[in-house]
Amino acid sequence: MSFAPVWAHRLGYFLSPQLDLYRNIAAKFPEANRIMDYGCGTGFGLLQLAGTAKLDGMAAFRIPLGIDCDEHAVDVANRLLGKVATFRVEDWADMKLTPGYEGQFDLVTCIEVIEHVLAPGRLLKNLAASVAPGGCLVVSTLNHNSQYRKNNDHRSKFNVDSFTAMIQEECSSPFITDFKLTDPVDDMSQVTPVVAVWRKPSIA
Protein backbone atom coordinates (compact mmCIF):
# COMPACT_ATOMS: atom_id res chain seq x y z
CA MET A 1 0.00 0.00 0.00
CA SER A 2 1.31 3.46 -0.84
CA PHE A 3 0.12 6.96 -0.09
CA ALA A 4 0.42 10.30 -1.82
CA PRO A 5 2.44 12.96 0.03
CA VAL A 6 1.03 13.96 3.39
CA TRP A 7 0.35 17.54 2.33
CA ALA A 8 -1.94 16.32 -0.47
CA HIS A 9 -3.47 12.98 0.44
CA ARG A 10 -3.86 13.45 4.18
CA LEU A 11 -4.76 17.13 4.47
CA GLY A 12 -8.37 16.30 5.31
CA TYR A 13 -7.22 13.69 7.78
CA PHE A 14 -5.04 16.15 9.67
CA LEU A 15 -7.91 18.65 9.82
CA SER A 16 -10.72 16.27 10.80
CA PRO A 17 -9.56 12.65 11.08
CA GLN A 18 -12.37 11.42 13.27
CA LEU A 19 -15.09 13.13 11.26
CA ASP A 20 -13.63 11.59 8.11
CA LEU A 21 -13.86 8.17 9.69
CA TYR A 22 -17.41 8.68 10.95
CA ARG A 23 -18.48 9.79 7.46
CA ASN A 24 -16.95 6.66 5.96
CA ILE A 25 -18.70 4.46 8.50
CA ALA A 26 -22.04 6.14 7.80
CA ALA A 27 -21.56 5.48 4.09
CA LYS A 28 -20.56 1.84 4.62
CA PHE A 29 -23.45 0.97 6.94
CA PRO A 30 -26.51 2.82 5.60
CA GLU A 31 -28.90 0.08 6.76
CA ALA A 32 -27.82 0.06 10.41
CA ASN A 33 -30.68 1.28 12.59
CA ARG A 34 -29.74 0.73 16.23
CA ILE A 35 -26.40 2.55 16.54
CA MET A 36 -24.20 3.18 19.57
CA ASP A 37 -20.98 5.20 19.71
CA TYR A 38 -18.81 4.63 22.75
CA GLY A 39 -16.58 7.54 23.74
CA CYS A 40 -18.84 9.97 21.90
CA GLY A 41 -17.51 13.10 23.61
CA THR A 42 -19.64 16.08 22.66
CA GLY A 43 -21.33 14.06 19.94
CA PHE A 44 -20.21 15.70 16.72
CA GLY A 45 -18.76 12.47 15.35
CA LEU A 46 -21.91 10.60 16.27
CA LEU A 47 -23.92 13.25 14.45
CA GLN A 48 -22.54 11.80 11.20
CA LEU A 49 -24.37 8.55 12.00
CA ALA A 50 -27.74 10.17 12.72
CA GLY A 51 -30.42 10.88 10.18
CA THR A 52 -31.95 8.79 7.44
CA ALA A 53 -31.25 5.08 7.15
CA LYS A 54 -32.33 2.58 4.50
CA LEU A 55 -34.29 -0.09 6.34
CA ASP A 56 -35.76 -2.87 4.20
CA GLY A 57 -35.68 -0.53 1.24
CA MET A 58 -37.59 2.18 3.10
CA ALA A 59 -36.28 5.46 4.49
CA ALA A 60 -36.33 5.73 8.28
CA PHE A 61 -34.89 8.25 10.72
CA ARG A 62 -32.40 6.72 13.13
CA ILE A 63 -31.51 8.22 16.52
CA PRO A 64 -28.15 6.84 17.67
CA LEU A 65 -26.99 6.45 21.26
CA GLY A 66 -23.78 8.08 22.47
CA ILE A 67 -22.05 6.91 25.65
CA ASP A 68 -19.14 8.65 27.38
CA CYS A 69 -17.66 8.64 30.88
CA ASP A 70 -17.19 12.43 30.84
CA GLU A 71 -20.28 14.03 32.41
CA HIS A 72 -19.41 17.49 31.09
CA ALA A 73 -19.05 16.25 27.51
CA VAL A 74 -22.35 14.38 27.69
CA ASP A 75 -24.07 17.46 29.11
CA VAL A 76 -22.80 19.52 26.16
CA ALA A 77 -23.90 16.81 23.73
CA ASN A 78 -27.39 16.67 25.22
CA ARG A 79 -27.81 20.44 25.07
CA LEU A 80 -26.56 20.78 21.50
CA LEU A 81 -27.63 17.52 19.84
CA GLY A 82 -30.27 16.01 22.11
CA LYS A 83 -32.94 16.24 19.40
CA VAL A 84 -31.08 13.97 16.96
CA ALA A 85 -29.29 11.57 19.34
CA THR A 86 -29.48 10.18 22.87
CA PHE A 87 -26.52 10.51 25.26
CA ARG A 88 -25.67 8.72 28.52
CA VAL A 89 -22.83 8.86 31.06
CA GLU A 90 -21.30 5.40 31.59
CA ASP A 91 -17.82 3.89 31.85
CA TRP A 92 -17.69 0.53 30.08
CA ALA A 93 -13.98 0.12 30.79
CA ASP A 94 -14.69 0.07 34.53
CA MET A 95 -17.87 -2.01 34.79
CA LYS A 96 -19.59 -5.13 33.59
CA LEU A 97 -21.93 -4.61 30.69
CA THR A 98 -25.47 -3.80 31.80
CA PRO A 99 -27.65 -6.77 30.78
CA GLY A 100 -30.03 -4.49 28.89
CA TYR A 101 -27.27 -3.66 26.40
CA GLU A 102 -26.37 -7.22 25.43
CA GLY A 103 -26.93 -7.86 21.72
CA GLN A 104 -28.80 -4.59 21.24
CA PHE A 105 -27.01 -2.70 18.46
CA ASP A 106 -26.71 -3.16 14.69
CA LEU A 107 -23.62 -0.94 14.64
CA VAL A 108 -21.24 -0.12 17.49
CA THR A 109 -18.39 2.36 17.01
CA CYS A 110 -15.46 3.26 19.22
CA ILE A 111 -13.28 5.83 17.47
CA GLU A 112 -9.83 6.65 18.88
CA VAL A 113 -10.94 5.90 22.44
CA ILE A 114 -9.59 2.47 23.34
CA GLU A 115 -6.01 3.72 23.61
CA HIS A 116 -7.10 6.11 26.39
CA VAL A 117 -8.57 3.60 28.86
CA LEU A 118 -6.82 1.60 31.58
CA ALA A 119 -8.52 -1.68 30.64
CA PRO A 120 -8.88 -1.78 26.82
CA GLY A 121 -9.57 -5.53 26.84
CA ARG A 122 -12.51 -5.14 29.21
CA LEU A 123 -13.91 -2.29 27.13
CA LEU A 124 -13.59 -4.35 23.96
CA LYS A 125 -15.37 -7.30 25.61
CA ASN A 126 -18.29 -5.06 26.54
CA LEU A 127 -18.42 -3.49 23.08
CA ALA A 128 -18.50 -6.90 21.40
CA ALA A 129 -21.21 -8.13 23.75
CA SER A 130 -23.43 -5.16 22.90
CA VAL A 131 -23.46 -5.99 19.16
CA ALA A 132 -26.56 -7.76 17.89
CA PRO A 133 -26.19 -11.02 15.93
CA GLY A 134 -25.28 -10.01 12.39
CA GLY A 135 -24.31 -6.52 13.53
CA CYS A 136 -20.93 -4.82 13.23
CA LEU A 137 -18.34 -3.39 15.59
CA VAL A 138 -15.92 -0.72 14.32
CA VAL A 139 -12.97 0.15 16.57
CA SER A 140 -10.12 2.49 15.62
CA THR A 141 -6.86 3.55 17.23
CA LEU A 142 -3.76 5.49 16.27
CA ASN A 143 -0.84 3.42 14.99
CA HIS A 144 2.22 4.27 17.05
CA ASN A 145 4.49 2.92 14.30
CA SER A 146 3.26 5.75 12.13
CA GLN A 147 4.90 9.06 11.38
CA TYR A 148 1.46 10.72 11.53
CA ARG A 149 -0.18 12.10 14.70
CA LYS A 150 1.84 10.35 17.38
CA ASN A 151 0.64 10.82 20.95
CA ASN A 152 2.89 9.70 23.79
CA ASP A 153 0.21 10.39 26.40
CA HIS A 154 -1.92 7.40 25.40
CA ARG A 155 -2.23 4.67 28.02
CA SER A 156 -1.94 1.98 25.33
CA LYS A 157 0.35 2.50 22.35
CA PHE A 158 -0.93 0.11 19.70
CA ASN A 159 0.63 -0.82 16.39
CA VAL A 160 -1.03 -3.00 13.76
CA ASP A 161 0.20 -6.24 15.37
CA SER A 162 -0.74 -5.46 18.96
CA PHE A 163 -4.10 -3.93 18.00
CA THR A 164 -4.96 -6.94 15.84
CA ALA A 165 -3.99 -9.34 18.64
CA MET A 166 -6.21 -7.52 21.15
CA ILE A 167 -9.18 -7.45 18.78
CA GLN A 168 -8.80 -11.16 18.00
CA GLU A 169 -9.07 -12.04 21.69
CA GLU A 170 -12.76 -11.08 21.61
CA CYS A 171 -13.66 -10.93 17.92
CA SER A 172 -12.94 -13.79 15.56
CA SER A 173 -11.76 -12.94 12.04
CA PRO A 174 -11.79 -9.14 12.23
CA PHE A 175 -11.04 -7.07 9.12
CA ILE A 176 -8.12 -4.74 9.80
CA THR A 177 -8.02 -1.75 7.48
CA ASP A 178 -7.11 1.92 7.15
CA PHE A 179 -9.36 4.82 8.02
CA LYS A 180 -11.06 4.79 4.63
CA LEU A 181 -12.38 1.28 5.37
CA THR A 182 -11.12 -0.03 2.04
CA ASP A 183 -7.64 -1.54 2.05
CA PRO A 184 -6.43 -4.22 4.44
CA VAL A 185 -3.13 -3.28 6.07
CA ASP A 186 -0.11 -5.51 6.54
CA ASP A 187 1.92 -5.93 9.72
CA MET A 188 4.50 -3.35 8.67
CA SER A 189 2.01 -0.69 7.65
CA GLN A 190 2.38 2.82 9.05
CA VAL A 191 -1.16 3.89 8.21
CA THR A 192 -3.05 5.71 10.96
CA PRO A 193 -5.53 5.22 12.37
CA VAL A 194 -5.86 1.45 12.20
CA VAL A 195 -9.47 0.29 12.03
CA ALA A 196 -10.93 -3.08 13.00
CA VAL A 197 -14.28 -4.10 11.54
CA TRP A 198 -15.94 -7.17 13.00
CA ARG A 199 -19.30 -8.69 12.12
CA LYS A 200 -20.90 -10.72 14.88
CA PRO A 201 -22.07 -14.13 13.65
CA SER A 202 -25.79 -14.44 13.16
CA ILE A 203 -27.67 -16.95 15.28
CA ALA A 204 -28.99 -19.77 13.10
Image: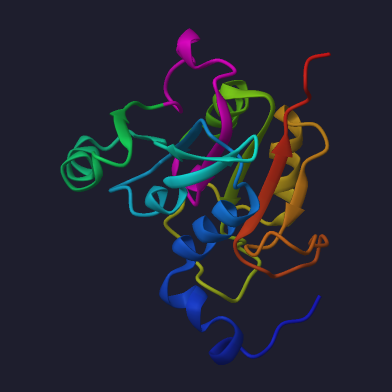
Up the image or down, 196 lies above or below 192; here it is above
What residue is shown at x 47% (from left), y 76% (from top)? Answer: 14
What residue is shown at x 60% (from left), y 76% (from top)? Answer: 147
Up the image or down, 61 lies above or below 17; here it is above
- Which of 58 and 187 lies nearest the eye of the viewer? 58
The quadrant of the image that shows the N terminus is bottom right
What residue is shown at x 77% (from left), y 41% (from top)? Answer: 174
On the image, the x and y values in percent for residue 47 come to 37, 50
Which color scheme did the rendering employ for the protein? rainbow
Up the image or down, 103 lies above or below 49; here it is above
The span shown in magenta is 92-117
- Which of 73 and 201 lies nearest the eye of the viewer? 201
Q: Is residue 175 left or right of residue 60?
A: right
Residue 52 in view, yes or no: yes
On the image, the x and y values in percent for residue 130 come to 56, 23
On the image, the x and y values in percent for residue 86 come to 31, 33
What residue is shown at x 21% (from left), y 39% (from top)? Answer: 78
Name the residue at the top extreme: 99
